[in-house]
């Protein structure tokens, strides 16, 4: 086998989905083609960048500019080690299947053509391959994985166990990621931005009450709680103390744990524009402290109370 064929056989991209035998057997047809010849399907060939259009099924829409520039510099020095994967649309038109970052970095690097493995694929296969490659990226955050899992279920008509087989994950792992989608958008954004970990999120998912989830989220950020402490906090909130459980406030609402007091305290602070403090004992007795900064401030609060 010629050295050219060996080079063409490297960097298969989605190698797990492709056959070495098919790739090598068809590589000869991609070698020595003329400018007017059309590269064969199931071969690796140099494709002009202006002939490759973006993958409409690309699940990832955020790419770090700094990382792309670093990859572009690497491509300038080393070239593209792993070819892109494309499907042919016409004689001089291709659609990207995988390799979005490499494609973008190649444009930044000033390349006019890139090595690409040409294969056939329908829309369903395009979606699945793009999502699988995306999921297998090491730097993917938990929310990107969760959204990709949900897309595979919705768009590829897969069950959770079938999805697990496709991506090499057990069903429990798949379920844990999908449950993240039940969290409020604010918490999902924090997971995406790595403000909180997957462990923190899993603890909050067990709570069905959104207000409780947001309270725990706030506690994590303000007190830098570990995953273990969050699990303990969630457990205590889901298992209220029996003592004082039947005590009822003047508004008729049960006040059975610190979370409920904290929620009322936060609501009152927001209403009056001052830091309101609520103190209560185990029997439900206590007081509400509303501070004021001046006589005018006191009058403002009294007007709000219809005094």
Image: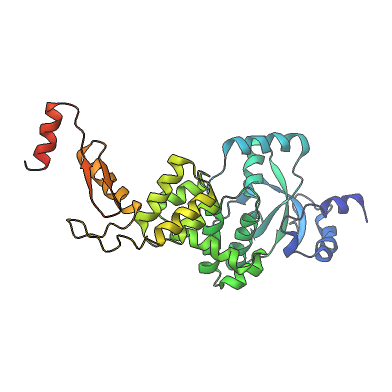
Q: Is residue 115 above or below residue 176?
A: above
Count of numbered circles in the view: 0
Q: Quadrant of residue 207?
A: bottom left
The x, y position of residue 97, in whole percent, is: 64, 57
119 left or right of 2? left
Q: Quadrant of residue 96?
A: bottom right
Q: Depth check: 122 or 289 in front?
A: 289
Q: Residue at x 52, y 67 (%)?
A: 155
The x, y position of residue 50, in whole percent, is: 62, 45
Q: Is residue 51 above or below residue 160?
A: above
The x, y position of residue 110, in whole percent, is: 67, 35
Q: Quadrant of residue 9?
A: bottom right
92 left or right of 192? right
- Looking at the image, can residue 95 be seen? no
Q: Residue furthest top?
A: 294
Q: Is residue 140 above or below residue 25?
A: above
18 left or right of 304? right
Q: Residue furthest left?
A: 307
Q: Residue at x 63, y 50 (%)?
A: 52
- Looking at the image, can residue 119 be seen? yes
How was this image coloured?
rainbow
Q: Depth check: 52 or 71 in front?
A: 71
Q: Dividing the image into 4 quarters, which one contains the N terminus?
A: bottom right
Q: Residue furthest right?
A: 1
The x, y position of residue 94, in whole percent, is: 64, 55
Q: Dividing the image into 4 quarters, which one contains the C terminus?
A: top left
Q: Depth check: 183 or 272 in front?
A: 272
168 left or right of 284? right
Q: Depth check: 276 or 134 in front?
A: 276
């Amino acid at each position: 086998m010629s050295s050219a064929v060996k080079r063409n056989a490297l960097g298969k991209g989605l190698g797990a989905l492709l056959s070495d035998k098919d790739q090598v057997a068809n590589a000869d047809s991609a070698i020595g083609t003329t400018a007017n010849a059309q590269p064969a399907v199931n071969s690796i060939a140099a494709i002009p960048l202006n002939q490759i259009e973006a993958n409409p099924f690309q699940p990832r829409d955020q790419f770090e500019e700094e990382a792309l520039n670093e990859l572009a510099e690497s491509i300038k020095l080393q070239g593209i080690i792993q070819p892109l994967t494309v499907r042919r649309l016409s004689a001089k038109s291709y659609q990207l299947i995988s390799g979005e970052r490499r494609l973008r970095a190649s444009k930044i690097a000033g390349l006019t053509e890139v090595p690409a493995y040409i294969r056939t694929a329908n829309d369903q296969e395009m979606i699945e391959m793009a999502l699988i490659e995306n999921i297998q990226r090491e730097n993917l955050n938990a929310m990107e994985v969760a959204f990709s899992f949900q897309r595979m279920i919705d768009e590829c008509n897969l069950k959770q166990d079938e999805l697990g087989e496709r991506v090499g994950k057990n069903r429990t792992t798949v379920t844990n990621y999908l449950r993240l989608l039940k969290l409020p958008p604010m918490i999902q954004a924090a997971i995406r931005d790595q403000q909180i970990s997957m462990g923190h999120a899993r603890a909050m998912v067990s709570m069905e009450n959104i207000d409780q989830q947001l309270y725990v989220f706030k506690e994590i950020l303000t007190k830098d709680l570990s995953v273990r402490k969050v699990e303990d906090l969630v457990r205590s909130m889901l298992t209220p103390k029996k003592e004082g459980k039947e005590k009822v406030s003047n508004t008729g609402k049960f006040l059975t744990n610190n979370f409920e007091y904290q929620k009322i305290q936060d609501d009152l602070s927001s209403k009056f524009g001052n830091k309101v403090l609520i103190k209560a004992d185990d029997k439900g007795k206590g007081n509400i402290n509303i501070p004021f900064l001046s006589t005018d401030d006191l009058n403002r609060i009294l007007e709000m109370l219809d005094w």
